[in-house]
Amino acid sequence: MGLFDFLKPAAPQDSAAARRQADILMSLRGGRVPTATLDRLTESAAGTKPWMATLTPAELGIARSHGLKPIAAISATCWLHYGWSWTQGHSQGWETALERLAQEAKACGANAVLDVKMRTIKVEAGESMDFTLIGTAVKVEGLPPSADPIIATVPALEFVKLLEADVVPTGIAIGAHYEWLQDWRGNANQAWMGNVESWQLSNLWETVRQRAHAQLRESARPRGNGVLAHLNFSQMFEREREQGERKFKEYLARHIVIATTVDARKGTPLPHEIKMVVDMCDGKTPLTGTKRHHQSYATNEQDGAI
Amino acid sequence: MTTEIPVHAKERLKGLRSSVHSTGVFTSDFSVNEFLLVRKAGFEPIGLCVGTCVYHVGIQYGSWSKNQEMDVLSKAMYHARELAMSRMRAEASAMGADGIVGVKLTIKRLEWDEHLLEFIAIGTGVVHGDGHKGFRAHDGGPFTSDLSGQDFWSLLHAGYRPVEMVMGSCVYHVAHRGVLSGFGTVGKNVELENFTAAMYEAREIAVERMQFEASAAKAEGVVGVEIHEGSHGWQTHVIEFFAIGTAVLPLEDEIAPEKIADPIMVLSVND
């Protein structure tokens, strides 16, 4: 049921749709771009169909003035069920989507994908989540298509700013770690004691965060020499457990950190003068940006600054 | 450095009524900055253009375990938007506009009937200050675009002009997982391939339709592409994928890439 529906005989009016779905499934399994998408991308690349870009007009201007030409808005999805681990599912889900996005970028002869956004559709579907990446594939005038297009999870203006400073955003790195703590002696919960550190929980957080960041470094290493623009997500849960006669509390801490990897050459300064301005705008100012670039994580923004 | 206040503004400040508005007043939903930038780009607003369409959306149920496009709903969502947009454009034509800037498309549900949706398209009609007709769409009618006044100025300075607001809609039913498919996934992180495939198909259909509209408008490309996912009171698992953007063409006197001015970098020192 479900997965193999397409193998069943279909009504004639459904057969084209069924063929297309079968093609999508088979292509994704084989690590290829689905045929319908491939055809569209090929035509966009050849210029026989209009190019498409998620860029704003200002971004289009700066892309043009720096020799970048948009080819197509491309996207990739991996919908993952967490039968094993929610936390590690995030790393697996984004990695898979990233590979698929790179396939689409290659299919349209791109040198880079920029303005890549992480998106998630809110559909209740059990223990699962949709990992979607959307961005704009571009070619650089005078360069041949790249065998390994770079994937930049920053908006086009930032992409160009980075390139001018000899910094190439190359992709994303992910660190995700979780750990359980069984609190047999009730040490973590010391409500009766007044001011005292709950050292078990401190330790738990420290371990989980350190491991997640260590993993982030490992994940970044093959792609560049640094990471920028962290996106942090962390959660802790408490639950009661019973084992035989004994009742105890159990804690789960999870931490996910996602960042843009960069390949930065040391010592190339930004070739622009920077003017200091006083912005007279009250409240949120467009100078500092008004929209969140990624949508998948309601990061712990509401927790407040330290 | 002081900038001289123009003669006309000075006279108005002195309390003198101007005699130049023989055509009456203009209306627009521009902010102050948008108004100034649209004028800087060589255009004048002439009037707000509105198109409305109240549409009864038909009923269609997806089969429980099947990925499928809900073509009845797709057509409804597209047709209703198209009607609202074309009515807005007809208003713009009637007032002699060369184009419409800042089109906003909104959908409202009407309280008393869950199948009635109200579609509204609203934007500001503009004319070229020197009467240049080269900015009109391929059919000689006004161009349409969802670009703000700021975006409009930026687009012209990037060497392009808007032609038509293009869109593609696909309402899609994402299959529910069968009871049995839960087996074999316990203790493993596995991809739900049919969900993934549903996303791919639905998005592809929406994007293809948008690109087709851009081709039909004889555009070179589409800027500001966004893909929205929304639900308008349908069953769970029924999602509309809606692709939208502004189709563009290079300006008649194309701006050479090296002529495009670099923005100045500033640091806001407020905090």
Image: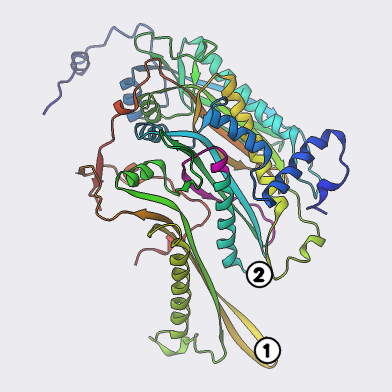
Image coordinates of residue B147 in percent, x first then y, are 45, 29
Position above or below: A7 against A306: above
The region drawn magenta spans A104-126
Disc 1 or 2, which lies upstream in sequence? 2
- Determine crowd level at label 1: few under 14, some 14-19, many 20+ residues with C-alpha closer than 10 A: few
Image coordinates of residue A238 in percent, x first then y, are 56, 77
A18 displayed left or right of A183? right
In the picture, which quadrant includes the N terminus of chain A? bottom right
B127 displayed left or right of A44? left
Determine the residue located farthest toward the left in the rendered image. Answer: B1
In the image, residue A128 lies in the stretch drawn in magenta: no
The chain identifier of the residue carrying mark 1 reads A
Q: Which mark is residue A243?
A: 1
For the question of whether residue B52 can be seen, the reply is: no
The chain identifier of the residue carrying mark 2 reads A
Residue at the disc numbered 2 = A84
Position above or below: A20 against A194: above
A8 or B48: nearer the viewer:
A8
Q: Which mark is residue A103?
A: none
Q: Nearer the viewer, mark 1 or mark 2?
A: 2
Corner quadrant of residue A197: bottom left
In the image, residue A124 lies in the stretch drawn in magenta: yes
Residue under the image location 54 percent in, 77 percent down: A179
Image coordinates of residue A123 in percent, x first then y, are 65, 52
Amino acid type, residue under disc 2 in the picture: Trp
B180 displayed left or right of A154? right
Mark pair 1, 2: CA separation = 22 Å
For the question of whether residue A54 can be seen, the reply is: yes
Q: Secondary structure at mark 2?
A: loop
